[in-house]
Amino acid sequence: MNKSLTLYTRAGCPLCEEMEAAIEGLRGGRTIAVARIDVDADAALKTRYGWDVPLLFDGETEIARHRLDPAVFRAWLAGNP
């Protein structure tokens, strides 16, 4: 699988770092690109998400908010072979 996800984050966010590490640990050798987007660098994103980070998306589909649920992420992986 060569899949790309979007991780909305901000500098100095421990939960963001935790989610990124969890993705890495659960990807099971699959190639998954994670585009990190700092919400503070874009006024519209900062307004939209505020302090509600990290957020993980596949396109427009939200996969996780605040913490990555391993079962949900594995289900997403299973649906994206």
Image: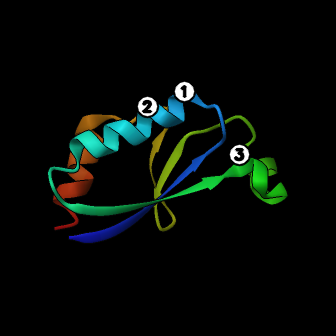
Q: Is residue 74 left or right of residue 13?
A: left
Packing grade of label 2 (10 A; few <14, some 14-19, many >=20) is some
User: Which of the 4 image quadrants contains residue 10?
Assistant: top right
- The amino acid sitting under disc 1 is Pro
Q: Quadrant of the C terminus?
A: bottom left
Residue pictured at 20% horizontal, 62% vertical: 79
Mark closest to the chain's N terminus, 3 or 1? 1
Q: Which residue is mark 2?
A: 18
**70 or 33: nearer the viewer:** 33
Tell me the distance, in whole angstroms, between the alpha carbons under discs 3 and 2.
18 Å
Q: Which residue is mark 1?
A: 14
Residue pictured at 24% horizontal, 40% vertical: 25
**56 or 40: nearer the viewer:** 40
- Contact between marks 2 and 1 (CB within 8 A): the answer is yes
Image location (x, y in percent) of residue 16: 52, 36
Q: Is residue 59 left or right of residue 69?
A: right
Residue pictured at 52% horizontal, 29% vertical: 15
Tell me the distance, in whole angstroms, between the alpha carbons under discs 3 and 1.
17 Å
**70 or 21: nearer the viewer:** 21
Under circle 3, the secondary element is helix
Q: Which residue is mark 3?
A: 49
Packing grade of label 3 (10 A; few <14, some 14-19, many >=20) is some
Tell me the distance, in whole angstroms, between the alpha carbons under discs 2 and 1.
6 Å
Q: How was the colour assigned to the protein in this rendering?
A: rainbow
6 w.r.t. 23: above or below:
below
38 w.r.t. 6: above or below:
above
- The amino acid sitting under disc 2 is Glu
